[in-house]
Image: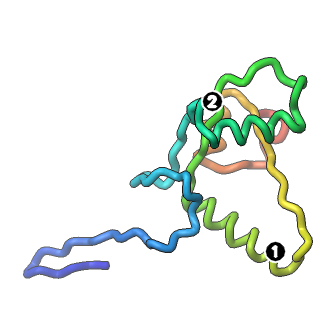
Amino acid sequence: MEQHRGSIIRRVRRKNVDSTLPEMWEDSDQNCKRITLQSSSKEYQDVLARFHVTMLGKYLQIVKIERIQNERWYKQYDAHREDFKRRYPNIDERLLFHGCPSTSADQIIQECFNRSFAGVN
């Protein structure tokens, strides 16, 4: 929305109150944000428990667990998820855990997953 006052134009950005973003996400002016979860947090413990279900004994060490907040990609994901739920009411949603070097993580966060890099990251 733009507000006009004399010859000055000021753009006012307002957040949508009924956002579909997850409750645990932090407010941010950035479209993409990387947050290291504290090992004592419920979110960290939930992710760790889900990870252990399929990966226990298959890794050496968890260095850290991060939440990636990308509003644009999350909204695209959410729209696709709702479409799938409508078309396939009995569909299962599964979590995918991805481990990679920090430099690869930076690229994935900025450019999203690119299947042409399969086996590289």
Residue found 81% across the figure and 74% down from its top: 85
Residue nearest the viewer, comparing 93 with 13: 93
Question: Taking 42 as reference, is 20 above or below it?
Answer: below
Disc 1 element: helix
Residue found 76% across the figure and 19% down from its top: 61
Task: Report the label total.
Answer: 2
Using residue 3 as the reference point, say whether residue 108 is left or right of it: right
The color scheme shown is: rainbow
Which residue position is annotated with label 2?
Answer: 103
Q: Amino acid at mark 1?
A: Lys
Residue found 50% across the figure and 74% down from its top: 18
Which residue position is annotated with label 1?
Answer: 85
Residue 7 bears which disc, if any? none
User: Is the N terminus in the top left, top right, bottom left or bottom right quadrant?
Assistant: bottom left
Using residue 43 as the reference point, say whether residue 83 is left or right of it: right
Instruction: Tell me the crowding category of disc 1: few under 14, some 14 to 19, or many 20 or more residues within 10 angstroms, Cα based.
Output: some
Q: Amino acid at mark 2?
A: Thr
Residue nearest the viewer, comparing 85 with 119: 85
Residue 84, quarter of the rendered image: bottom right
Question: Taking 23 as reference, is 66 above or below it?
Answer: above
Disc 2 element: helix
Residue 73, given in percent of the width and then of the height, sits at: 62, 60
Instruction: Tell me the crowding category of disc 2: few under 14, some 14 to 19, or many 20 or more residues within 10 angstroms, Cα based.
Output: few
Question: Taking 107 as reference, is 19 above or below it?
Answer: below
Lower position in the chain sequence, tag 2 or tag 1: 1
